[in-house]
Amino acid sequence: MVKRKVIYIVNPRSGIGKKNTIESEIGALTNKDEVDSKVVYTEYAGHGYELATQYKDEADVVVAVGGDGTVNEIGTGLLGGQAALGIIPCGSGNGLARELDIPLRTSSAIEIINDGLTRSIDVIKVGERYSLNMAGVGFDAYISHKFAKVKVRGPLQYMNLIAREYPKYKVNDYVLDIDDHIFQRKAFFISFANSTQWGNNIHIAPSASMDDGLIDVCIVSEFPDYAIPAMLVQLLSQNIDANKYDEIIKAKEIQLLNKKPLLGHVDGEPIIIEPNSRISIMPLALKVVVPSAEYFETSRFAPSNIRDFIQSTLPVTELTDIPEMVRKNLPFGGKKKM
């Protein structure tokens, strides 16, 4: 039997402590009867893309071990090749991994890579860059540019940054050509969604699909502070599309008719979007390794294990810490303004 070739590309800066154990875990958990594996490490920004390009026609699977930026780099490098993208999520948001139901436990993610089930997903092209999950302009892009300069990263740092910058941020005017229809909007942010969520199960585009050949354009207009608690609940409960400040338009192509460069992001990575840039969909352009339906019927997701599974994926010591974390990070301390 011919073994499948799997290349693990590890970003050693992602995931606290993972860089010290990941290679031994891969060695111990890889099904050596069916898989030949190799571990390589990125050494500088952009190296993941270079390595993925090198292996995209040599390997069956190239695995991104890191956060959303690493996944974007490696997935972009695989476009046009034969290799599928695998993911071991080690980042702050893990948006694509969560959307594809890839577990955040390294051992479970390696099991899925051993199984080797794949599906094809769309990719969004933003100017000359690519987004596998979510791109955008406005407040989330502004935050991504700020967050890139933060030395200590993680979900709590991200939330604190949002809370600090939110009161200072001013909405902008945007003109968009969406499938030959002109839209003028004053928006807090605009997301171009391939999946339903940014990450951390915060869903901005509840009806988005990664294989429908469409981009969900999510336009969030300026909103009062008192609307924030309801919006947070709707983002987590996947019904933000019912909010009056949110407008979602499905599209194949968008042109941003801005006269000046805009701060943007692709999968949370900061970029500059040049005037009159086009945003388009590339249908089923990337193969990704995903869990099978049977995977979730096993005992590892039995009710008795749910608390441990949740706690292992959250950046807190106790689950009781969560309400206090959320309250502290609301712009007005969790108290509704009258």
Image (spheres, rainbow, N blue to C red):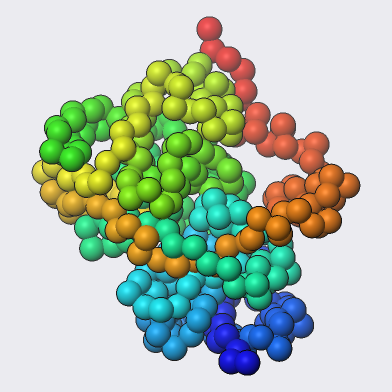
> Among all residues in the image, which is located at the extreme top?
338
Q: Nearer the viewer, residue 193 or 316?
A: 193
* Residue 39, picture quadrant: bottom right
> Among all residues in the image, which is located at the extreme front?
1
Q: Position of residue 41 (x, y in %)?
A: 54, 83
Q: Residue at x 58, y 62 (%)?
A: 290
Q: Nearer the viewer, residue 289 or 334?
A: 289
Q: Nearer the viewer, residue 222 or 267?
A: 267
Q: Position of residue 226 (x, y in %)?
A: 50, 16
* Residue 223, picture quadrant: top left
Where the N terminus falls, by quadrant?
bottom right
Q: Position of residue 29 (x, y in %)?
A: 74, 79
Q: Residue at x 60, y 89 (%)?
A: 3
Q: Residue at x 32, y 46 (%)?
A: 214
Q: Specify whether 187 is left or right of 15.
A: left
Q: Is residue 270 in sight in this rendering?
A: no
Q: Residue at x 76, y 53 (%)?
A: 297
Check the image and report above or below for 316 versus 177: below
Q: Specify whether 146 is left or right of 308.
A: left
Check the image and report above or below for 59 versus 330: below
Q: Nearer the viewer, residue 112 or 187?
A: 112
Check the image and report above or below for 21 versus 58: above
* Residue 222, picture quadrant: top left
Q: Position of residue 229 (x, y in %)?
A: 56, 23
> Among all residues in the image, which is located at the extreme right?
304
Q: Is residue 292 in sight in this rendering?
A: yes
Q: Specify whether 31 is left or right of 131.
A: right
Figure disc tally: 0
